[in-house]
Image (spheres, helix red, strand yellow):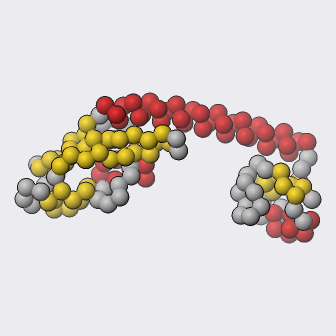
Amino acid sequence: MEVILTKDVDKVGKAGAVVKVKDGFARNLLFPKGLAIPVTTANLKKIEQEKQKLTQELEKNKQEAIKIKERLDVLSLTIPVIAQDEKSLYGSITSLDISNALKEEGIELDKGKVILEEPIKSLGIYEVPIKLHPEISAKLKIWIVKK
């Protein structure tokens, strides 16, 4: 039986793909869980429209990411913190702190887009990568200074 997958299914295929599966697998697992729909001309048309809509949405998100990248490339962010001595901080700077500092600059970013391998624990200048889109990333220059 041929079905159209509505969601990604391991070892079967990706969403939107037309795949051939055994009748029992389709009737007992895929259809009841909403993972697939039967192949009909109406369903094929519906899936094609959803793909076009998704493509347009992804292109819109990509254009927004390019605009944000241009702003981040010229931005130098200063974060004042309380430090113990000349180098070490009392706490640490995390991706949430960087996200909040960007929010004060007028750039709304989810903390998950700020890529920190480990929290910043000392004063200095850092370049932090930010993943804006699967194809677009930016480098943000951050100055950690003593209050």
Where is residue 37 drawn, in percent x and y? 84, 54
Determine if residue 88 is in view: yes
Q: Nearer the viewer, residue 33 or 68?
A: 68
Q: Is residue 112 left or right of residue 116?
A: right
- Front one among 119 and 45: 119
> Percent from the top left, x then y, of residue 51?
72, 40
**Residue drawn at (90%, 65%) of the image:** 22
- Name the spot of residue 19 as percent of width and height, x first: 84, 55
Q: Residue at x 25, y 44 (%)?
A: 142
Q: Which of these two is toward me, 32 or 88?
A: 88
Can residue 110 be seen in the rendering of this structure? no
Q: Determine whether, in the image, residue 58 is placed left or right of residue 8.
A: left
Query: What residue is at 92 percent from the left and 65 percent from the top?
Result: 23
Query: Is 5 on the left or on the right of 86, as rendered?
Result: right
Relative to residue 87, is residue 92 drawn left or right? right
**What residue is rendered at 79% in x and 39% in y?**
48
Vertically, is 128 above or below 64?
below
How many discs mark residues in the rendered view? 0
Quadrant into which the N terminus falls? bottom right
Quadrant in the rendering for residue 106: top left
Quarter of image, res 68? top left
